[in-house]
Each structure stands twice: as structure tokens, then as C-alpha cells.
């Protein structure tokens, strides 16, 4: 707390009087507390949040493709039980990765992600030989909220060529971005 009217001894024994004014006026304090509150909301992830939704699947030993379905509750995830309170939900990223020790996933020949009949992600090219994961190209501007509110499911289809003879364990990870504002 600043001291007012406090007299102290200066250089060579001269007495000086120091007046310390409060550094923050009520207006500055109000603005500062609003700014601090906003930074706290953003920093704590309360304004927007990214989260991963994963689907394990097996490639090989069966048909030359896999189709995974994600329902609306998986896509809204930890954002809110009431999707109407969320202002925006988008697909930020998608990747396929090997979860076994087999490594190489160059047998994946294509992948598409759709919701409500609209394509929002694709594999632009097969992974290079030796690759253990691959990023899909996604349309992160496509708003998913209306589809989720209507109960649409997100569908991911992954194709193989050639189909692995030995079954492989893979995982599809979708990074969902949700925002309250």
C-alpha cells in the first residue's frame, strides 16, 4: 500500500516529503480486470478448445477398405452437452497412423471424410514408403455445427491398395475445434 505524506531523510541529512499516488484509477482497474478475465478464459480453453476423437481400425485380412462412423456426441465431445451453446465446430486436422510395430502405411491408397454428404477431408496422395503416419487435407472452414445439430454422422472411408496380407492396427484421429464465440 502506498504511503502518503511520509517524510524520510535524503542525501546529506536533508528531509524530503514523498507523495506516492495510487498507480491505478478505478477505470484502469476495471479495464485491466476485464482484460485479465478475457486472457484467463482464452488461456484456460473456455473460449475455444481443440480435442481429438480417435477410431481404431484394422487394415488387411478382409475387405480393401474401412469405413468409420463418428456420431454427433463424439464430435461435440467435451465442448458442451448442449450444442446450441457452441458458436462454431470445425474439423481442424485429421491423420492416420500405425499403432502396431509394422510401421509402413504406404498401402493406404485413399481416404475421404464426409458429413451429411459433404466432403470435408481427403488424402491428396498415398503416403510415401516407410511412412508411419499421414495427414489428411481438411476443409477447416466448413461449419459442422448444423450437421451435428441435425444428428448427422461423420463418415471416414480409408482404401488400401494392395490390401495388406497381415492384419495391421491403425488409428484415425480427428482434431475438432470448438468455440463459444
Image (cartoon, rainbow, N blue to C red):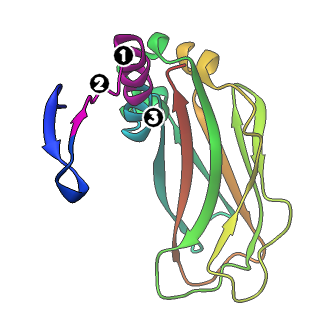
User: Is residue 25 depicted above or below 96 in this figure?
Assistant: above
Is mark 1 in CB contact (under 8 Å) with mark 3? no
Front: mark 2 or 1? 2
Quadrant for the N terminus in the image: top left
Of label 2 and label 3, which has the lower sequence position? 2
Describe residue 177's horizontal placement relative to residue 29 as left or right. right
Q: Residue, x 55% and y 40% (percent of image)?
A: 176
Give yes or no for residue 135 being in the magenta stretch.
Answer: no
Distance (Cα) linking label 2 and label 1: 7 Å
* Residue positioned most to the right: 125
Distance (Cα) linking label 2 and label 3: 29 Å
User: Is residue 134 depicted above or below 43 in this figure?
Assistant: below
Residue 42 bears which disc, if any? 3
Describe residue 162's horizontal placement relative to residue 57 as left or right. right
Residue 93 bears which disc, if any? none
Q: Residue, x 49% and y 27% (percent of image)?
A: 72
**Image quadrant where residue 39 sits:** top left
Q: Relative to the observer, which residue lies in front, 116 or 78?
A: 78
Bounds of the magenta span? 16-37
**Total labels drawn:** 3
User: Is residue 167 depicted above or below 176 in this figure?
Assistant: below
Secondary element under disc 2, as helix, strand or loop, is loop
- x and y, in percent, of residue 102 in the image: 54, 88
Secondary element under disc 3, as helix, strand or loop, is helix
Q: Which residue is mark 1?
A: 25
Give yes or no for residue 17 being in the magenta stretch.
Answer: yes
Answer few, some or many: residues within 10 Å of disc 2's Cα (few below 14, many 20 plus, some between 14 and 19): few
Q: Which residue is mark 2?
A: 22
- x and y, in percent, of residue 105 in the image: 66, 78
Secondary element under disc 1, as helix, strand or loop, is loop
Amino acid at each position: 500500500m502506498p504511503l502518503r505524506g511520509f517524510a524520510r531523510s535524503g542525501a546529506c541529512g536533508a528531509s524530503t516529503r514523498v507523495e506516492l499516488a495510487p498507480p491505478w484509477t478505478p477505470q484502469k482497474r476495471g479495464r485491466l480486470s476485464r482484460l485479465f478475465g478475457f486472457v484467463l478464459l482464452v488461456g484456460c480453453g473456455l473460449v475455444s478448445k481443440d480435442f481429438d476423437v480417435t477410431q481404431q481400425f484394422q487394415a488387411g485380412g478382409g475387405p480393401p477398405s474401412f469405413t468409420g462412423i463418428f456420431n454427433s456426441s463424439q464430435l461435440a465431445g467435451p465442448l458442451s452437452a448442449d450444442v446450441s451453446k457452441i458458436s462454431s465446430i470445425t474439423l481442424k486436422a485429421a491423420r492416420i497412423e500405425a499403432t502396431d510395430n509394422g510401421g509402413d502405411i504406404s498401402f493406404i491408397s485413399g481416404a475421404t471424410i464426409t458429413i451429411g454428404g459433404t466432403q470435408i477431408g481427403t488424402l491428396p496422395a498415398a503416403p510415401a514408403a516407410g511412412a508411419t503416419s499421414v495427414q489428411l487435407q481438411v476443409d477447416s472452414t466448413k461449419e459442422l455445427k448444423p450437421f451435428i445439430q441435425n444428428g448427422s454422422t461423420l463418415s471416414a472411408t480409408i482404401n488400401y491398395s494392395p490390401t495388406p496380407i497381415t492384419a495391421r492396427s491403425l488409428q484415425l484421429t480427428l482434431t475438432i475445434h470448438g468455440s463459444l464465440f
